[in-house]
Image: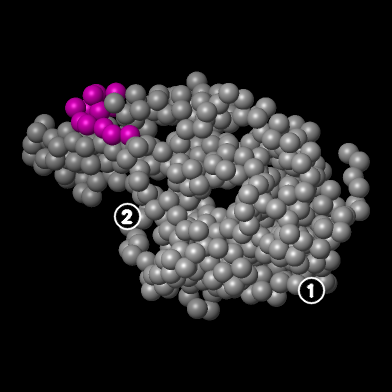
Amino acid sequence: MSVTTKASDAVLEVQANVEAVQSTLVEVADKIWKLAELSLEEEESSGLFIDTLKEHGFTIDSVGTSNIPTAFAASYGSGGPVVGVMTEYDALPGLGNEPVAEKTPRKDGKTTGHGCGHNLIGAGGLGAAIALKEWMEKNNIPGTLRVFGAAAEEAEGAKIYMARDGVFDNLDACLHWHPLSVTTPWHAKCAAVNMLLIDFNGKTAHAGAVPWEGRSALHAAELFAHGIALMREHLHPTARTHYIYTDGGLAPNVVIEHAQIKLFIRDVNRPLVEATTEWVKQMAKGAAMATQTESKALVFCGMHDLLPNKPLADRIYEHAVQIGLPEYTEEEQAFAKKCQEATGAKPTGMSDKIIPPFDEPPALGGSTDVGEVSYMAPTMGMLVQTCPAGNNVHTWQATALHGMSIGHKAMIMAAKTLASLGVDLFTDPELLAAAQADFKQRKGDYVFKTPLDPEMKRPMGLDGIDHKLHEGHDQHLKQLAQDSAKA
């Protein structure tokens, strides 16, 4: 594809705005990296974003958005177009590592880590938002810029609840990005998914003396799991089903009263996932009938597939080419090569290529709650290399890379790229119209419906967390009330 690398004055201005706050963005990214708070527990991390946005003139519209204490929404401006920017900030368990190119536990004993780079996602989105806001304010650009604190992407993502509650309903477009081992527009499909808890309840008894008086929930779970294995032969090749036993009893000499399986169902779209989900629910009932137990199937979390957008992918690629990849020092390349060697990969270091968007977006096996947003409005992201080839996210190597200068440089490139596309969305009605047309064509006549079961009022993971807001969050809520009273 033909690419022009000449940027408009407005685009150059927002890129300079990113550079002006680079030290702040690195500081935020490093603080979030050190905090490494797990999904739904990101109280200090979300508070840091809220404070930084307020310092830069944003209005904090809500804290604890959609009944999730660590989610928030902020905005600047008024009227249309309305452009959103996503931030994420949750870490992963078991991936804590010092920012060194070898597997080294953190000196402070913290075992969680940003192996998916959400510290960079958050800081990069923050940088794009600040740069756009400064440009809008200086040049009297009409429109509304919205920033979403999308907590818990690694678990029961906040975007799922925010989409259900209409938080994204008035968006004209939305921006996001993600660290990876390549640099390319995120012009790809991600899988839709349902996450289910399958509970079986039986009757306890002495397994040796009077087993006939009991009914084993574990037998029901085993029969159900066997059914899943047989079902796989008859699913579409794009389907994935994977599960674990979360409860199988405590003692073999007691007939098991309760058993539970956690099951994921993935496929290329919601209709296929929903069809398989109904089949799974039938199997749970059948296994319960066969063992004279009772069953319950709960969809506690679900996500839509991610809709690509070709006009936005082409435009963000132009900006990425104009910005160019970061320049790496010899020390940084040596760091990357050492990370590659740790996994047996060829030590080639960081790439010097930006991959154009595919004409036909590939289907990826993973899932993301960004999919919910992509059914609300045209949505486009950038994948930026933070890991060298042979390494990838969700590893200790990624945690290390995301806590040092290689990660910082990727984050700055992402912020510039998103801000540049943001300028176009605010000033180029033809691009926005093309993006909207592509969005409508891909969505077709599908009507968005939340995958969540009606009884899910908030993420299930909050039940295991003392979710009373800490003093810092209480202060944010009080300040928000005071700001509203003054308005």
- The answer to whether residue 148 shows anywhere in this view is yes
Q: Residue 426: percent from the left, percent from the top?
A: 73, 49
| Location of residue 442 with respect to 134 vertically, above or below | above
Q: Where is residue 432 in the image (x, y as percent from the top left)?
A: 73, 40
How far, Cα to Cα, is label 2 from label 1? 45 Å
Res. 344 visible in picture: no
In the displayed structure image, the side of residue 387 where residue 333 appears, left or right: right
Q: Which of 183 and 316 is in front in this view?
A: 316
Name the residue rendered at 71%, 32% in the picture. Answer: 438
Amino acid type at circle 2 is Asp
Q: Earlier in the sequence, mark 2 or mark 1?
A: 1
Q: Position of residue 365 (x, y in %)?
A: 60, 38
287 inside magenta stretch? yes
Q: Mark 2 points at which residue?
A: 463
Q: What stretch is highlighted in magenta?
A: 286-297
Q: Is mark 1 on a helix, strand or loop?
A: helix
Q: In which quarter of the image is residue 192?
A: top right
Q: How is the image coloured?
A: one colour
Q: Mark 1 points at which residue?
A: 331
The amino acid type, in three-letter code, at marker 1 is Glu
Q: How crowded is mark 2: few (under 14 residues within 10 Å), some or many (20 or more)?
A: few
Between residue 67 and residue 394, name the one nearer to us: 67
